[in-house]
Structure formats: structure tokens, C-alpha cells
Amino acid sequence: MFTYKDKKFYLDGKEFKIRSGSLHYFRAFPEQWESLMQKYAAAGLNCVETYIAWNVHEAKKGQFNFSGIADIERFIKTAEKVGLKVILRPGPFICAEWENGGLPTWLYKDGNMRLRCKSEPYLTHLKTWYGVLFSKIKPYLDANGGPVIAVALENEYGSFGDDFEYLSEVENIYKEAGLDCLFFSSDGDDEIFLCTGSHDHVIKAIDFACSDIDMDVHFAPTDKYLDGKAPYFAAEYWGGNYTHWGNEQCYTCSNEDFAKNMRQFVEMGASFNDYMFFGGTNFGFMNGANIFVNDFGYLGVPNVFHDHNPSALLPTMTSYDYDAALTEWGDYTEKFFIVRDLLEKENGAPLPPLPPEPEFQDIGEVELKCSASLFDNLQIAENYKSKTVESMEYFDQSYGYIRYRKVMAYDAPYDYIELDGIRDRAQVYLNGELIGTRMRGFDESRITINGLKKGDVIDVFVENLGRVNFGISTYKGDYKGITNAILFSNRVMFDWEVSCFEMQDISKVNYECNTAAKCPAFFKGEFKAEPNRDCFVHMDNFTKGIVFVNGFNLGRFWDVGPQSALYIPGPLLKENNEIVVFESDAVKGKVSVNITSQHGLKGKRPKYHRD
């Protein structure tokens, strides 16, 4: 059993120092997990840590998925095969710069739902979810001979609230499900977070950033808990950080500070989890977002949206590279060798040889010869007539885009259209022509017009840029679409046609070839490739949208940067492949993409070659 005594962890009676790295199973392909974990072992790590994202497994209420990228059991068994212990963090809130902090959006259907507190409707759903999840996890606990040695209770709750009754409910659900293992909480490294993050009888692990500071300063606030007998454990040592769309360049963290902190962990005998040792990718629509009013928690990297308005929405970009020890595509960096050299000395024995680096390929230019207008393909949407403008969640929509259409039944001298409650980016069309684009917290919500006539068609096309993953929205919810009303000259407009484009299945899109459809539109092409060799699709000729390869949504692209190419994992590729680009704004040049071996992350360190 994994336990603790007198500031030390023990596994089966022997002292055990956690040397862990985060690897989120939902940010990599299952075919890549073993190779990545072998690199963890080669760096000297003895554990792998992962969040469990509720919205990955129960995207629709009562419909559970544990296959493919959601196969948590395969992930745990892979770790055991490689020789790593496992630390699980099942939330239910995970933050993680993940869409909605991992909470499923169907919880919002009940507008009175209150999350992350002792609210019976919420706890009822949580107990059902945990009942399904824990039945799968329980056999892999170390008490049952498995590799799972510790499980987190909630996540960073001290940054959110103080409902100790709720925290007790979560702990009781764990115990009633038979999770016989060590529990811990994870919060910021200050008493303001630690005082409400969990009950005092729970080990309080801490989260903090790579910085030039003495490690005992970080850990000192934990000494007052558990009679000072709990081991020092950094559940999240941020060896890098995430990057928002609109940043000047990708976030990076000093290798010098990283090395200093790692040395201090070893010298103190403290346990750590490097968040992230491998970051991976926010595939599909699963990136989170943040709103940092008055720079609270802001990462300090120049950003076109934040610098214009500190309360603007900041979506996290598709790459979750995190300036981690292993790149988004699993290649080695200098930080990897900092950890490997340090832990090899600590172990006093040679570490396993290095697994091979990823293999890449250059495809070249791929022309997208077929296209299709989105608004001419309503068969891929769920379509409704609605008296009022409602959010995505009202129509049981979680992700993607929503279009509100009104056909004028009368002439009117209206002089503006106003969008009340933009969530998150809206494009307004009059008779098919774009007349304005507005973004949450960034733009004035009004768009000037010069009157409307009977038969005029107004389309308001709204993109969910990613639900906020941290803060008050994890209490009442971050609703998407237009959340209040669409007004014409301060008059609420009624009678709308609504089309919900979740983009989960685009196989029924009707294309025409050798034409260029008007955006928003799909553009399709084909290319040959070698399976299991990685590459990157460069989007220089496009503005904003998403890319599908063989029906799989790679994620968002956006010319605001700093990411200009999307990662294509080798396991996704076949000999003959289909690529579809959905462009919401405009094609800027030739209707083609370039698929190469170059990553396209601005400010990202070059490939590391060890002498």
C-alpha cells in the first residue's frame, strides 16, 4: 500500500519519492501512449499522472464512452506494462486548460444547476458518473495489486470556494465506491488557497510555477496541516505553461530556473509531478479559455486581445506543447535531459536507453479542389424554429457553431444590430454579405446598418471558442451562442431559425468540385502519406477554422497566431487520406495547404540535439 509517515511517502513499506510527469490520455493518440511512457521511464520518472475529463467520457447525458482516446483502462495498463505507478485526478473539475474544466455541458440544461457545491441535482449526476468510472478504476488500485497509488479529491478547490460539506460528499463517494488508496488535494502554494482546498485530514499537495525562488518558500504553508507530518508534494510543478491565441509567441520557461527547481526537489527529498512532462494537443473543440480581469493570473505574454481589453476572452490554442520536457509530438528537449541527468544521479544506476525520436514526413502542397457552403448544408445541423434567441445549451449543443437567422417580415428604419451576450465570436451577415464581426469582451457589440426591408435576411453566426476552464464560470456555467438577445435599434427581435453545427460528423456535406464556395465553407482535398509518420498542416492561406483529417478534428487554426500549423499524429494517417478545412472567414490565397515536417509554433525552441 502507498501511505505516508513523518513527512515521507512509503510504498509496500519502503520509502518512495514521487518522480512523476503529467500525461493526459485525451491529448494523445492511444497508439502513442506506450512510447511516451517509455520516455518517462527513460527520464527516471517512476509515476505518470493524468486528469480524468468527465466531458470526454459522458459528452451526452447517460452515454458513456471508454474507447479509443477515452480508454482510461488501457492507459493505466500501459503504464503498468512500462513500470510506472499511476496518480489519478478525476476532478470532477480539472481545469487543465480543457473545455469547461472537464465538466459536461449537459449539466447546464437545468438553468438552476449549481456546480461544485452541495447541490442535490449536481451531486446526483456526479454520483452516477463516479459510479461508472470507479467501477473501472477500482481493480487497478495498488491495494488490489495494480499501479494506481493515489487519487486526488476535487481540484484546486481552494481557488474556488469553501463548501466543506461538498468536499465531504466527494470524499464519501470515493470511499463508498471502495477506493481504498491515498487521497490528496492540490491547490496553490499559499494559505489563502490551502485553507479551503480540502479538509485538514487530507494531504495538501501544492501547485506552482517554474521560477527563481527557493523551494522551501513554496512548501512552508503546508507545514501547519496534518501536524506537520505530511510529505512535501508538488502535484503540479509548472515546468512550462500554456499559450493563448493572440499571444505574440508561445510561452516558454527558463531552462535555468527549471534545472534549479528540479535540483531543489531532489535535495529536499520532496516529491513532484512535472506538469506537463508531455503536453500534447487540444484536439477538436476541447481547448479551454480564460478571462483575466486586472491581470489576475495572466501569464504576462503580450496578447492582442488582452492588451486591448483585460476582460477579453482568451482561448487556449490548439497546441498544448506547454514548453514541456517532451514536445507536443513527443520529441526530446533540453528539459528532458535536465531531468534524466538529475534522476540518474539520484538513482545511482543507469537509466533505460532512450526510445527513438518521432519519425516525420513531408507531403508538400495539397490542393483542396472541392468546396461546399456551410449554409447550403443544413443537413449536418440540428435545425429549429425558436421564438427567442437562446444559448447553445438550450438546444442541447455543446461545441462548434450556431447560426441564428431572421427573415424580415416588414420594412423598418433600424440603424443598428446589437448582440447582447456574445459567447464568443459572432459574424453578422445581411443578405449573405458580412457586415461585422464581434468577439466577447473585445469589441463594441453594435453593428451599424441603414434600415431593413421586408425579405432581408440577417444571419448571426457564432463560434464557441472554448468554455472558461477556471473561475466563477465553474459554478453557474459558461453558456455559449447569444445568451441574452439580438436587438435591432434597442428592440428585442423574435422569431428565429436556428441551426446548430456541432461538427461531430461532416460526412454528409455535399461538395462541388472545381469551384470555390463562399465562406463559411468546407474545402476538401486528398493526399498520400506513410502511416505512423508525423507531420504538420500549415494554414498560411486560410484565416480561421478547423481541420479534419480522415474525419478526425485536429483542432482550431487562427491567423492571429502564434500557432500557424496543426499537428497530424502519425497513427491517424493511412496511405490514402482525406483532408477537409472548414474556413469561417476567408481564404487568403490559393486554396491549398502545405503538409510538412516543420511545426509552425512561433517562439518555440528548435529541435534539441544532444552531443
Image: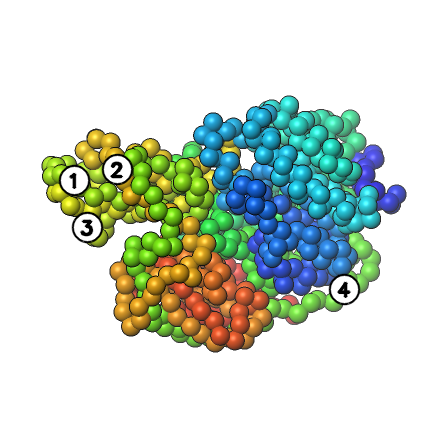
Q: Farthest right residue?
A: 13
Asked if 222 appears above or below 428 in the picture, the reply is above
Is there any visible trace of residue 173 in the rendered image? yes
Give the residue type at disc 2: Asp
Circle 4: element type: loop
Q: CA distance from mark 2 to mark 1?
A: 10 Å
Circles 2 and 1 in contact, beta carbons < 8 Å: yes
Mark 2, residues whose alpha carbon is within 10 Å: few (<14), some, or many (≥20)?
some
- Select label 4 or label 1 by which is in front: 1
Tell me the residue that label 2 is attached to: 495
Q: CA distance from mark 3 to mark 2?
A: 17 Å
- Select label 3 or label 1 by which is in front: 1
The label number, if any, that marks residue 150 in the structure image: none
Give the residue type at disc 1: Ala
Location of residue 2 (image quadrant): top right
At x 70% / y 66%, what residue is drawn?
A: 354
Give the residue type at disc 3: Asn
Give the residue type at disc 4: Pro
Which of the marked residues, 3 or 2, is nearer the chain's N terminus? Answer: 3
Tell me the residue that label 1 is attached to: 409
Is there any visible trace of residue 333 in the rendered image? no
